[in-house]
Amino acid sequence: MSHEPTLPAGTTSVPPGDLLGTHRVLSPPGAMPQPAERLDADPSREFSTEILVDVETLNIDAASFRQMEEASGGDLKGVERLVLETIARRGKQHNPVTGSGGMLLGVVRRVGAQATDRGLAVGDRVATLASLSLTPLTVRRILAVRPASAQVDVEGTAILFHSAPVAKMPTDMPERLALALLDVAGAAPQVARLAQPGEAVAVLGAGGKSGLLCAAEARRRVGMEGRVIGVESFPAYAEELRALGICDAVVVADARDPLAVRDAVLPHTGGAGADLTLSCVNVGGVELSAIVATKDRGKVYYFAMSTSFTAAALGAEGIGRDVDLYIGNGYAHHHAAHTLDLVRGSEALRGLLASRYG
């Protein structure tokens, strides 16, 4: 079945393109935009189902930014070079090592005739909620690299497909903070689905951006009868997490050490393990830590893009642990509004996030 929509009467000069963006795939033939090796990001080519955006900031996925920092020895000029090389080669910011992308902030320049149903107009300030790993992108130059927030200010253009989620920027918080929150907007609403009243929830990487949101959402869902255990490897982040007061216990442990994580979590769950463990750590090798911290027939949710789902599945099998494994989907219905409202509802959480990302 074709995904190409029917052209409205009188519109024949601009081709529609495919709603899923396959018309922008250059290689390999038949690929979807996300797994494709290379996309056509030429903004001069018009398709009536597309939206063209002038890009101001790239919010790079945490795992991707960390990898580029390490590959560059901490040299931000090296990060610039890797970003420009990736975009020039692939037509998108799709890290070839981590496989992840990020999202962007920009201003709508053009709305195709068959994209008006998206509710956007020229001049709207928007954030894309679809990964940079599938967004056709050109960057003329990089203006600044901000490692604390994994954000890169640029001059460039991006093409949004009809199927790609996008949100207008809120006006009641700094744009850099809103962009940072929208980058991980899928996490909190999915925790809301998984966490049940009275449960024990462990959050690995609880002091980071997605970890803070997951811990706050877990607190709302399990209630005072439940327990939220934050696991954080950085002592400074652990102290900030304690000060927030959303966790019943905060422990410092390296998520790459499964036995240390297990021994840190179990005493706070009566020795049974967590009903739900949320892994928000942006490094590899932490898959088993989440599993051993979880009780038999519990649930494990992996949000970080650094997760190896092979390691998670085979790791659970290898230690005979019957747990349900959930892949962190970056999209959920109404996820942008959910996440922004979560932060608006807590002055302490908003203040902490603003101090880091605003």
Image (cartoon, helix red, strand yellow):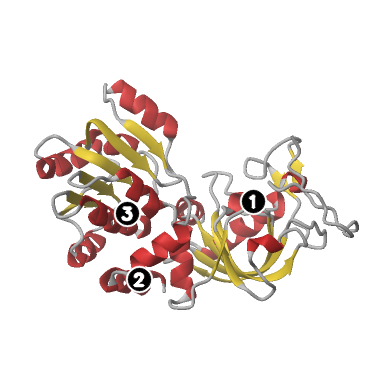
Residue position for label 2: 344
Quadrant of the frame with the C terminus: bottom left
Q: Secondary structure at mark 2?
A: helix
> Relative to residue 237, is residue 43 drawn left or right?
right
In which quadrant of the rendered view does residue 260 lie?
top left
> Relative to residue 7, is residue 290 drawn left or right?
left
The image's mark for residue 150 is none
In this orientation, which residue lies closer to the viewer: 206 or 326? Answer: 326
Name the residue at 44% across, 63% down: 337
Residue position for label 1: 163
Name the residue at 90% across, 58% down: 13
In which quadrant of the rendered view does residue 321 lie?
top left
* Residue type for callout 2: Arg
Where in the figure is residue 233, as x and y percent of width and height?
Answer: 26, 52
Q: Is residue 346 above or below residue 235?
A: below
* Residue type for callout 1: Ser
- Tell which circle, 3 or 2, labels the residue nearer the N-terminal end: 3
